[in-house]
């Protein structure tokens, strides 16, 4: 395995866990909530967690770049970029719902090669490095073998995102084709696909920091991650993650709609 990838991956696990644990100290108390220009919420926990990750990485790899939800893009010179969502699921965090995570994606020359999703309240670290396998804590994970949408479980974040995008009917068509549907939103639907607990995660309205880490985890677990036009990108608001076996069928339905 590429040693430059491995050393950064090891740091990614450590940094995500430390930042997530820092955020949890706020989660277990009361805290002020601000709103950004796009009306999305942000807390001191989001800001301090991202600052911690950036400082840890900058000390170890000063030539690496960053893209973070709270502090934006900082180009690097090494070809590596760290994509940070310090609290994915801030609205859950604010309401003291335990399904939130610190996400840290590792890119090399624009490709997602590794990812960590640390869920502090549940004590779970989903992680993957290309060629090294995907894991939750120390347990290897793999996508399901469910062969058709008719047998599949569909995850999604919010019907409201599809409504605002003018794709509510698209979502409902897919909803009706699947066996079960659960609103396990944000990062959680993606890692459920990676570990074979769900088969499809459909999302609209995401940013690169929302999905860079989970794309790497899903793919290393044997699944597929694309936009709705079958491009393997994190730079579109419309994304689809599946076990691979139902990907083509799902895309066909999305295109038909």
Image (cartoon, grey):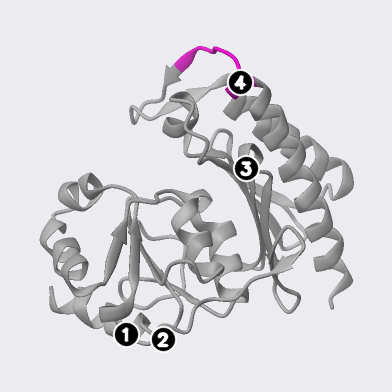
Q: Contact (CB < 8 A) between labels 1 and 2? A: yes
Percent position (x, y) of residue 233? Answer: 46, 68
Q: Which residue is mark 2?
A: 245
Query: Mark 4 highlights which residue?
Result: 28
Q: Check disc 3 and report the residue beneath it.
A: 122
Are dots 1 and 4 in contact, CB under 8 Å? no
Helix, strand or loop for disc 4: loop
For the residues marked 4 and 3, what is the alpha-carbon distance in whole angstroms?
13 Å
Q: Which mark is residue 148?
A: 1
Tell me if residue 111 comes above or below residue 236 in the rendering: below
The CA distance from mark 1 to mark 4 is 42 Å
Give the mark nearer the N terminus: 1 vs 3: 3
The crowd level at tag 1 (other Cα within 10 Å; few <14, some 14-19, many 20+) is some
Closest to the observer, 99 or 77: 99
Does residue 194 show up magenta in the picture? no
Span of residues in magenta: 26-33
């Amino acid at each position: 395995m590429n040693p430059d990838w491995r050393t950064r991956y090891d740091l990614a696990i450590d940094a995500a866990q430390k930042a997530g644990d820092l955020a949890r100290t706020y989660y277990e108390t009361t805290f002020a909530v601000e709103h950004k220009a796009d009306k999305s919420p942000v807390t001191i926990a989001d800001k301090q967690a991202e600052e911690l990750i950036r400082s840890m990485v900058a000390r170890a790899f000063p030539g690496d770049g960053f893209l973070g939800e709270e502090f934006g893009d900082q180009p690097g010179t090494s070809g590596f970029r760290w994509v940070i969502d310090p609290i994915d699921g801030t609205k859950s965090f604010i309401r003291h719902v335990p399904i939130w995570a610190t996400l840290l994606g590792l890119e090399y020359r624009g490709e997602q090669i590794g990812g960590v999703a640390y869920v502090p309240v549940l004590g779970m670290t989903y992680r993957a490095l290309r060629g090294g396998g995907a894991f939750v804590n120390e347990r290897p994970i793999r996508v399901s073998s469910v062969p058709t949408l008719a047998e599949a479980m569909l995850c999604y974040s919010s019907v409201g995102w599809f409504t605002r995008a003018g794709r509510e009917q698209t979502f409902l068509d897919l909803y009706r084709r699947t066996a079960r549907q659960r609103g396990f939103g944000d990062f959680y639907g993606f890692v459920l696909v990676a570990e074979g607990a769900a088969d499809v995660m459909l999302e609209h309205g995401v940013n690169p920091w929302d999905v860079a880490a989970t794309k790497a985890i899903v793919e290393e677990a044997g699944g597929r991650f694309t936009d709705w036009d079958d491009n393997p990108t994190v730079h579109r608001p419309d994304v689809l993650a599946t076990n691979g076996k139902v990907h083509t069928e799902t895309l066909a339905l999305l295109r038909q709609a």
